Each structure stands twice: as C-alpha cells, then as structure tokens.
Image (cartoon, helix red, strand yellow):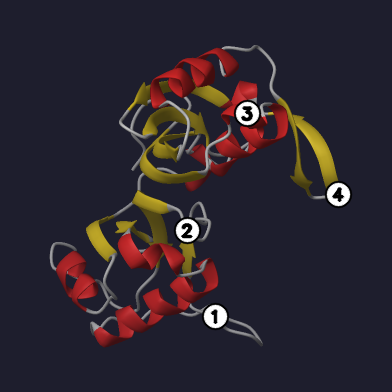
Amino acid sequence: MDKLRLRFEKTGRAVYISHLDLMHTMQRAFSRAGYALKYSEGFNPHPQISIALPLSVGAASRCEIMDFKLKEDPILSELPAKLTAALPEGIRVLEAYEPERKVALIKWLSVEGVMEYDERDAGEMAEALTAFYAADVIVITKKAKRGMGETDIRPGIREIAFEAGEREVLVRAVISAQEPTINPELLAEALRQRKPEIAPDFAKFTRVETFDADGKVFR
C-alpha cells in the first residue's frame, strides 16, 4: 500500500483544537497505536500526513479526510478502532481505506448550522433569511491572499434552506469546498455585513459530507 486515507469526525470539545495542534495530535495517535508514519526525505524530513480541507477552530465536522503513508502495510479494518483509542474525546476515526481519487476533486460540502436569536422570532428570521439568500448576488468583504477585497459568495452556494426552531433557525446548505472556498461561517458573516437586522446572535456549523463536482459522495 502507498497512500492511505482516513475519514474522521471532530466534534464536542475537540472543535477547539487548532489545525496545527490536530496534526500533532494525529501524529502522536499513530505512534501510540503502534503505527510508524513514513517521513519525507531531505534536510528537513516531516511525517507524510495531510488533512484535505483544514477546519476552522470552533467548527465541527463528521467528514474530515486525511491522507497518510505508513512504513508498513496495516490491517485497514483494525486501524480506525486503534487510532480512536489513542485520540482525545471528540475525535473519532470512521474508516480507513486506499484512496481512489485526489482530494483536489472535492468540490462541494454539505453543512448544517444553527443560528440563534435571543429576542427575535425564529419564524420571522427564517423567512427573512430565505429571502436574503434568494438574491442572485451577495457581495461581502473578506480576506484574500492580497488583503481585504470584495467577493460574491452566491455562486459558491449550491443549495441553502432554513427551518425555524423555538429560538433558533436551522440551516442546511451545500457550499463550495474549493475554488472558491466558502467557509460556512461566511453565511453568518454575510448577514452581519449586508443585513445586520437579521444576523444571528450566535451561529455554529458542522460539516456533514463531501462531494465531487457531479454531486457524488467523495471518498
């Protein structure tokens, strides 16, 4: 076996682990579970491990993907349980397998979110949110490689729907994972910038699934 792939979830208190700390956590878990990672060659060797779409601190996911290489071929069916036992609460390996496609082919992310409103009516907010995201263009100011700039995020939102709860609005969306990258947190940020009267008091999001450009589940 050459390159291998993990699918894992990061939930609960683990959402506050940064991407860099997550990489270190994963490396230690492999060692504790008895798996030796391969290292790159050269003057500054590093473990051959990479996470496809780095997750923002505070965001949860049930579909994280990580590629890695080991010095010896493992029994893939045993790897998820052994790694999970060596990982902190909130990080759980769901499956390990040999990848068939490159992560560059990930195009869409299915996400779920909760927008909380302390004083405003959730039903009214759900209707207003639906109307706001029905627009053909939603331009916001966001950080880019060359500094702050204006970006239309609407083309990166394939689907979006809102459902009122008691004091919150549930969000389900399919957004662009790459080229362009639409962070789900931008769904709330767009409201703060363009329509603050319906912006939530608090919002949190969870990645649910990854898809290719044709809308097929990516593995």
Crowding around mark 4 (Cα neighbors within 10 Å: few <14, some 14 to 19, many 20+) is: few
| Label drawn at residue 146 | 4
Q: Amino acid at mark 3?
A: Glu
Write down the quadrant of residue 14 in the picture.
Answer: bottom left
Write down the quadrant of residue 45 in the picture.
Answer: bottom right
Crowding around mark 1 (Cα neighbors within 10 Å: few <14, some 14 to 19, many 20+) is: few
Name which of mark 3 and mark 1 comes first in the sequence.
Answer: 1
Visible in this render: residue 214? Answer: no
* Pick the front one: 133 or 145: 133
| Residue that carries the numbered disc 2 in the rendered image | 58
* Pick the front one: 58 or 163: 163
**Quadrant including the C terminus:** top left
Name which of mark 3 and mark 4 comes first in the sequence.
Answer: 4
Crowding around mark 2 (Cα neighbors within 10 Å: few <14, some 14 to 19, many 20+) is: some
| Residue that carries the numbered disc 1 in the rendered image | 46
Instruction: Select label 3 or label 1 by which is in front.
Output: 3
Q: Amino acid at mark 4?
A: Arg
Name which of mark 1 and mark 2 comes first in the sequence.
Answer: 1
Real-space Cα separation, disc 3 to disc 1, in angstroms? 48 Å
Q: Secondary structure at mark 4?
A: loop
Q: Secondary structure at mark 2?
A: loop
* Pick the front one: 214 or 62: 62
**What residue lies at 81% left-to-right and 33% top-to-bottom?**
150
**What residue lies at 39% left-to-right and 45% top-to-bottom?**
206
Real-space Cα separation, disc 1 to disc 2, in angstroms? 27 Å
Name which of mark 4 and mark 1 comes first in the sequence.
Answer: 1
Write down the quadrant of residue 123 in the picture.
Answer: top left
Locate residue 67 relative to residue 139 in the image: left or right.
Answer: left
| Residue that carries the numbered disc 3 in the rendered image | 197
Crowding around mark 3 (Cα neighbors within 10 Å: few <14, some 14 to 19, many 20+) is: few
Q: Are marks 3 and 4 in contact (CB under 8 Å)?
A: no
